[in-house]
Every structure is written in C-alpha cells, then in structure tokens.
Amino acid sequence: MADGGDQRVSPSCDVMSFKYIVIGGGIAGVTCAETLSPLCPTDSILLLTASPLIKAVTNYRKVTRTLEQFDVEERPMFELGETFPNIVVKHQKVAELNSHTKMFQKRLKNASRILIIGNGGIATELVYEIEGCEVIWAIKDSSITSTFIDPGAARFFQPILQQSKLPSEGPLKRTKYIINDDVTDVNSFEESAHLPDTPGSALGPDWHEGLSMKGKKQVSHQVHVVYDVEVTCMLSPDEVKQSRLKTEMLFEKEEQDQWPVYVKLTNNNVYGCDFIVSATGVVPNKHPFVDGGQLSTCEEDGGINVNDKMQTSVEDIYAAGDVCHANWVRSPFWMQMRLWSQARQMGAHAAQCMVADSSGENITLDFCFELFAHVTKFFNYKVVLLGRFNGQGLGEDQELLVRVSEGSQNSVKIRNNISDWMHTNGSILQGTWFGPVAFIILVSDQLPSCWIHKFVDDVTFSESLMHPELRKEYIKVILKNGRMHGALMIGDTDMEETFENLILNGMDLTAFKEDLLNPNIDIEDFFD
Ligand SMILES: NC(=O)c1ccc[n+]([C@@H]2O[C@H](COP(=O)([O-])OP(=O)(O)OC[C@H]3O[C@@H](n4cnc5c(N)ncnc54)[C@H](O)[C@@H]3O)[C@@H](O)[C@H]2O)c1
C-alpha cells in the first residue's frame, strides 16, 4: 500500500475485481467516480490518483441552464471512500502536492521583481494577485488575457493593472491541505533550472486563495506589460556580463544592478529579475495511455479522441477532461477549452455513458454541450463567456455590438494608519480613526466625476480620490446573419440568461439590433 493510502487497498490490489477503474484525481476523474457511485451502488469503483489529495467539486450551483459555478476543494483521498462506500482510492506515489505553490510563495516573499510568461488564466490571476513586487508580464499577443478576452475588453481591464487591489471579500471558505512544509529555497539560476516537475491534476478555480502573494517591496501593483514577445533564452548574470548585453531598465534609477536571472525576449530586450514564472498552459499526462499507439488521438491538440459517449477508439475505455479531444459533431455554439467547468461536465457525462453502455441503454449528449458557457473572475470582475464569445470560427462577416459603462468608484486612503486603500461605490467616505477602529460614514453619492481631495485633520481621512477610468461593465455580443452566436460579459450585467436564450433559440435579432445593448431598455422584459 502506498504512503497515506486507503487502508483497504493492498499493494497487490487486484484491479480486475473492480467494475470501473477511473484514472486521475483531478476534477474530471473525481466527478466521474462520484457520479458513477450512486448510479451503480452495488459495483465497486477504483480511483487511481498520482497524489494523496484529490480535487472535489463543492457548492455546485447552476447560474443558468448552461452556466455553472462551483468551488474546488482539495481533499485527502480517503475522504472520498467515506462518502461513497463503493469507491476505493489508491495512489501510486506520494506527490509533493502544493510544493510548486509553496515554493512560489516562499520565493515571492524575498522578490522585488519577477517575470511572468503566458497570457492565459493563471498569468492573469497572478498579475492581479501579486503585490509588493514589480511584475514584467511578457506576452505573445498584442493584448492581455487573450485566451479569454478580446482587445477591447483588455483595454477595459488595463487601468486596473496599476491600481491597488480591492480588499478581499471575506475569509477563505476552503481548507487547503499542505503535505510537505519542507520546501527547499531555490535562489540561484542554476538551481532554479532544476525545479521539480511533479505531475498532478490541473489547478481549480480560486487556487490562489489563501496564498500570500506579497513580495518584499512596499508597493501595490507595478506591472510592466511587454507585448508581442516570446522568450529567446534565459541567462545567468555571468552570461549577461560576458556577452555585454544591455539590460532594460524599468525605472530611471534601478534599485538593483544585478539580478539572479535574466531573460532575453524576441524583441532583443533583456530583463533581469528574481525569478521567472512560466504560465503557458497545461500539458495533459496522456502518454501512459497513448504510447502503445492503440488509442486514436487528435493531431491538432494531441488529445485522445472521444465520441459523444466519451468512448475512445478502444472498447470499454472512456476519456474525459483535459486529456481528451471532443471528436463529435459539435453544436455551433460549443467549443472545447481545457477548463474545470468542462472537466466536470465531461467527467459526469462519461460516468452516465459508462453505466448506460453496460446496461445496453442509449444516451444522448448532455445539454451542457449545446452551448459553451464559462463564468469566472478576472481582476475581481465577474466574467461570463457564452458561445463563440470571441467570434471563434465565425469568419469575416460577424457583427460586434459593444457596450462599456463607466463606473464611479472612489478609493479612500486612510492616512498613516493602514496602507491599503478602501473602496466604495459612488460616495465619499468620511470617518475618523480611533486606535484600531475606523468609523466610516458615507456622506454623498451625488458627486461630480472628477478628482477629489479631502483633508480633515490628523486623525481623519486625508485623501479621497475618484478613479474616472475605472469602468463598471463591458458587454459584447456577436451576431452573424442577425443571430447571436456568442457574448462576453464583464461585471454584474445580469444579461447571461437572456443572452443564453437568444443564442440557443436562434432568434433573428436584425430588427432589435439597435436596442439590444441600449442601457435604457430592460432587455430581459423586452424578450419575455
Ligand atoms: N479563470 C479561469 O477560467 C482560469 C484561471 C486559471 C487557469 N484556468 C485554466 O487552467 C489551465 C492552466 O492555465 P494557464 O494559464 O497555464 O493556461 P492557458 O491555456 O489559459 O494559457 C496559456 C498561455 O500561455 C501562452 N503560451 C503558450 N506557449 C507559450 C510560449 N512558448 N511563450 C509564451 N507564451 C506561451 C498562450 O498563448 C496562452 O496565453 C487552463 O486550462 C486554463 O484555462 C482557468
């Protein structure tokens, strides 16, 4: 039996005694096992995982017919067997789960400048979360977060990159388990080139919650984006000296003249930093399955081909989640993205198909695959993606309608007492600071949109600033031949259900185009 494993499983555990074997303790695998369990209560299920912690979906809620939101908890694997008696969990080796995030935290604490490569979900979240450290964000594209949002939406977020972070909304809801506290501090260039490459499942939503993302400087955000570049090579301080390469300065007067590591980018600029974060996507661990050559894979993305019943090309083998390629005739409004929402949906659908198959029933593709739907948070804004939200695959003759609303958010700094800014909507905060307690009252919500400075006395708020550039919402819909094919919503727009219906029912919107995003029309009532 492997360390920390389930006492009921012996090392020689006979896998043939299980009706179903699920490989992978990520969202797809765990959802599959959990869905199987009540569907076939008398059958035994074996879940094989590479780490002693598994990812469990909790607080699942449907936002609309296709949009779903949930949390992901990392749980000791034995807990699954306690809740689902017919599931046995086994792991092959003790993986140092969380070692990467722990290593990251530890190194960030002593860092004053880091370089982040990648322009997707993880990079975006890191750039927003990190404080107390300069961030050089090197991206391949000409706008930020391009995996998810268009250049217009990127401009909407742009001012936030330099602003102080909003205070977090509350205490952490979930427990994070740390297996191994003994993380070696890796500080040199040579050592950092050999960071452990532990296999594990993809991160879940809010993976960064509860982690301290603070560097050693007394600054909030200091992000410097370098567009349209890739990394040419990494260099040690000696290599930079010998090659006499000129390094880029971010400020007129640099605090440090030598960095532990340097990066040369394709625009020939060389940047020094404390360390580099590569957030360039997930590589599914499919090799154990495809190396024998029996399973058919997709040339384009390398995933294992599955049909609409999640069956691979080999009988009785199903695949779900990041590892698979959805090789079925797809709805015009659905596309595959390797996201936890799709991992959950595929894991659940695979379980239903496996049970239906074994009892000779026919099962159709789940409704969730009719429409691509993902809800997430970037820069502390709710972001909803529906259908072909960036016009993917729609060709030239697509039409975009965009609405951007200005916000009027104030930020108030409490002088000398707390360094963080406090934020409020559309009102001046005024209050007095008595020891550890701040008494705050809202004095006005009828303010002109301009910069406001307020000075009361030594113990009251000294400064109040408007952020005229801070925006409230960004809405984009994509029409083709008068019909809606996709939508992107940033902020609390409350449009998701209406747009979901409009996409799915294929209504001709030509006559309503002008009013579709008119803020004075309640579009929900209109289409009801
Ligand atoms: N809020 C969310 O929905 C969210 C947040 C975080 C992560 N995730 C998911 O978790 C997984 C991992 O996230 P991720 O950010 O690592 O992946 P990602 O797929 O979101 O982004 C990868 C990024 O790396 C870039 N890239 C790839 N190769 C590169 C190279 N050689 N040089 C420079 N850039 C390169 C890509 O252009 C892309 O911008 C993804 O499936 C992601 O969708 C989702």
Image: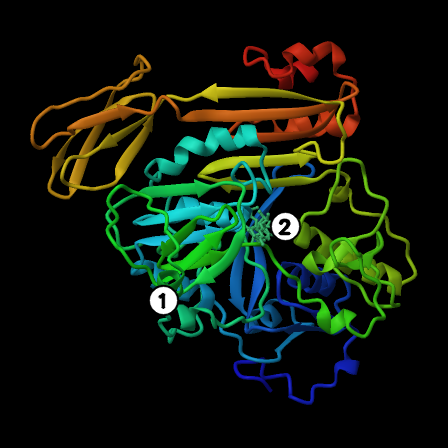
**Extreme residue in the right direction:** 360
Residue beneath disc 2: 339
In 3D space, how far apart are the residues under numbered discs 1 and 2 (Cα atoms)? 41 Å
Q: Does the closest atom of ligand 1 sit within 8 Å of the Cβ of label 2?
A: yes
**Residue that appears at 29% across and 61% down:** 110
Q: Amino acid at mark 2?
A: Leu
Classify 10 Å Cα crowding around label 1: few (below 14), some (14-19), many (20 and above): few
Q: Are marks 1 and 2 in contact (CB under 8 Å)?
A: no
Residue 225 screen position, x and y as percent: 44, 41
Q: Is residue 95 above or below residue 346?
A: below
Residue beneath disc 1: 238
Can residue 174 be seen by looking at this rendering? no
**Extreme residue in the bottom direction:** 12
> Which mark lies nearer to you, 1 or 2?
1
Q: Is residue 70 left or right of residue 301?
A: left
Q: Quadrant of the N terminus?
A: bottom right
Question: Reading the chain from its start, which is encountered first: label 1 or label 2?
Answer: 1
Q: Is residue 183 above or below residue 466?
A: below
Residue 510 screen position, x and y as percent: 75, 13
Residue 132 screen position, x and y as percent: 29, 49
Q: Is residue 433 left or right of residue 98?
A: left
Residue 245 screen position, x and y as percent: 39, 55
Can residue 445 be seen by looking at this rendering? yes
Classify 10 Å Cα crowding around label 2: few (below 14), some (14-19), many (20 and above): some
Front residue of 275/247: it is 247
